Amino acid sequence: MSLTFDFVQPQPEPAADRVTLFADVILPLPLPKLYTYRVPYELNDQVVIGGRVIVQFGAKRTLSCIVAAVHETPPKEYQAKYILEFIDDAPVVTQPQLQLFRWLADYYMCTLGEVINAALPSALKLSSESRVQLHPAFVREENPYPLSEQEEKIVETLSTGEDGKSLTFTEVGELLGIASFHKVIKSLMQKDVVFLFEHMADKYAPKVVKKVRLAHHFVAEAALEGLFAQLAARPKQLDVLMRYLQKVPVYQNEFTNQSGIEKAYLTSAPHLSPSAVNTLIKNGVLEQFDVIVSRFPLDDATQANMHFTLSEAQTEARDEVMRLFNTKDIVLLHGVTGAGKTEIYIDLIRDALDGGGQVLYLLPEIALTAQIVTRLMRVFGSRLGVYHSKFSDNERVEVWNGVLSGRFQVVIGVRSAVFLPFDNLALVIVDEEHESSYKQYDPAPRYNAREVALMMANFQGAKTLLGSATPAVETFYQTRTGRYGLVSLTKRFGEAGLPEIELVDTRKSREAKKMLNHFTPELLTAMETKLSLKEQVILFQNRRGYSPFINCLDCGWIPKCMNCAVSLSYHKHAHELRCHYCGYHDRMPVECPACGSRNIKPVGFGTEKIEDDLKVMLPAANVQRMDLDTTRAKNSYQQIIGDFEQQKTNILVGTQMVTKGLDFANVSLVGIINADSIIHYPDFRAHERAFQMFVQVSGRAGRKGKKGKVIIQTADPQQIIFDKVIRNDYLEFYDYEITQRREHGYPPFMRVIRLIVKHADQLLCERAAILLTGELVARLGREAVLGPEAPYIFRIRNFYLQEITIKLSREHTVLKAAKADILAAINVVKDEKDYKQARFVADVDPM
């Protein structure tokens, strides 16, 4: 769909008895308020809340936006402009969504425009750009003005090709090869040679497949025999016809011919001639037609063809969840790794669908969807939709529309799936609810999908099931206070027992000089043993790349990122240095730029180095790596996981992606290469994250009747957390952690808001943070405000950072008033001339 508008759109004055409507719209801009537009009278009946409209904002900016409200009250502060065009005759954003979006903007201290930008697939947001086109009255021979060489070039390009050809400003600049091309366009406008207009392009395009079928007058048996006779002298065309009839036997059922087959089935066949196919179409033997198809082709006949029986423990847990749902809206299913929580989820989803409701199933990582979708597809078939960032814009729009239309009754997705247009939710499942991957860090809204899912379920009267082997401390606290229900699964599914966990002291191994690269002899021997038994191994290292940095051994030089206060990581495969914060990269130096020495060595290790070392140490093993670098492509997750499931891969090396809910029957050994880097991190959640990560990755070992083994390499085996991991004692860990939180005033006893001040000038950043802290202390009190202080990484993307931490009581009224005070304090600093360029980020409930 492509729409073109002039900027001035005169409207007839309404008669005295006409109702003048105004629409408040959500512009995709970070504006504190909604903007009001006037509805053209002739379009009064077309305006729909939740539909998209096109408006002019500012002098020459045209935008698509969402109608949030319709009323008869004109704005007092400005003259309302007219809505230019209506895109939708039905809402693309539902009323429950608008309610949720308002809550998101309020709770996470951002604007509705920022929420809409995050929520809508980009293909549903129209793009706008000024374009140049020849003036309709322009005739080259009659134009009295001489044209320069550059002007002639533009006119020649616009004159060539179809009528109405236009160029964007960007294309004009590329055509002329200069940066200052605007004066050339202005000159052409003054000479009435060209005019400007704004082009609005709807970026969603349905997928169209070209198909062919036999012309209807050849379907009869006699006509078909005559056609064979005609084509006897044209063997290439006859081969095409025979291949079509093999696929579509019209002589058995003439109705099968109506739907035809894809043209590519004929043109791509190696022994057929594409030109012969086109000749048959041209001669009227075959008819070509277009069909709009789904990007998610599913066979309805495969629905609900997979049945399984819950174990006794699973049945008891399912029944207890259902019983608790009678009195609680939220239930936590606390089950050890491998307990069979997914089967319970599937059974509960069936119940919800039987009642006519919708279901949202959230997962923290795309890697998990690759494995679980296959299982759910066998049960729910075409009723299942999948939604995550690896899908194209058009694919995401199809899922969005599928939820709106009711085609997808179950959606499985990552955190962005909470924005989908559900309006009849019955059940929300948040699997691995403790995961920090549910938190959005940049840009706004900086939401936690678990909390958004809980609020969405609350608005729609749905039940929520949270699942985890290592629940977040805040979540388990809610079960202790009675707000959430609790169901426990303490045994693994089938005959599998919990894995044996062994701590290995790397410090002793290094002192004895027994370390081989970064492997202790215990881990290396265990890997060799498991591989000899044709069993598989997972190795976890929470750092990607080959090494964290390189170092000149003579002068000590370490290359730094030019935009951030971090060292550059070495990636051997690309043979370059990269910043993992801003993406800056540089070539790997041959010699030290400081002293000229060639004695430059990588220091430390990441997943890429472990993969390289294993290929040398265990040459018979097939080693594969799963981290951000190897999973950028759309289907890379499925490929890596598929190879491992089919045992084409012997050892899987990965970052935290490999810790999250993956289920591999043949994995009997898990190695944690460097546990200390996870424990010793400057954050109040460090021990919680370490415990969760160790238990989760350990849970990948020993499934389906096999007892697994976990080897944790550490230089500090006396850490208190290891004892709790070895005994898999979550309750003891929780009691220890909740005592620490209560004593020091952290969640769940307090709300935390982190304010980040950014500025390109370090001194101004510090001064702005000090001023903001003073304003906050005056409003909230000294005990509520901590900081300011520079974070561990104090510069990212050329902006210096200062952090202020605010601790608040959990009461709703206190929190709401505090947020208003925080925004007022920020505005005071913004109004200062010296800090106009400063940026302020509010992160509510930081992870």
Image (cartoon, rainbow, N blue to C red):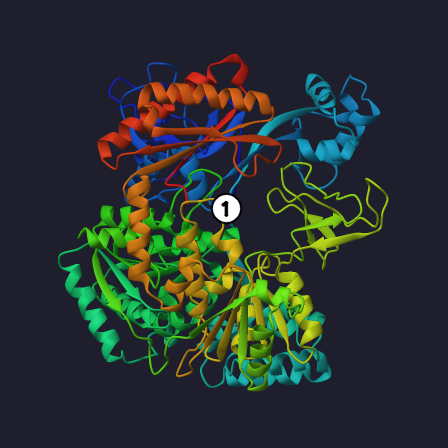
SS class of the residue under badge 1? helix
Nearer to us in this view, 663 or 122: 663
Which quarter shows the C terminus? Answer: top left
Question: Tag 1: Cα neighbours inside 10 Å, few (<14), some, or many (≥20)?
Answer: some
Where on the picture, by quarter, is residue 629? bottom right
Give the answer, above or below, for where 530 lies relative to 324: below
* Left or right of 656 on screen, residue 378: left
At horizontal 84% and vertical 41% (from top left) the residue drawn is: 595
Where on the picture, by quarter, is residue 643? bottom right
Which amino acid does the dot numbered 1 rest on?
Ala
Nearer to us in this view, 209 or 452: 452
Which residue corresponds to mark 1? Answer: 123
Instruction: Judge whether residue 738 can be spotted in this image.
Output: yes
Nearer to us in this view, 548 or 194: 548
* Left or right of 422 on screen, residue 571: right
Give the answer, above or below, for where 191 lies relative to 309: above
Q: Measured from the top left, where is residue 40 in percent x and y?
A: 37, 27
Instruction: Judge whether residue 386 can be spotted in this image.
Output: no
Q: Measured from the top left, where is residue 230 in percent x and y?
A: 66, 81
At horizontal 76% and vertical 21% (from top left) the residue drawn is: 142
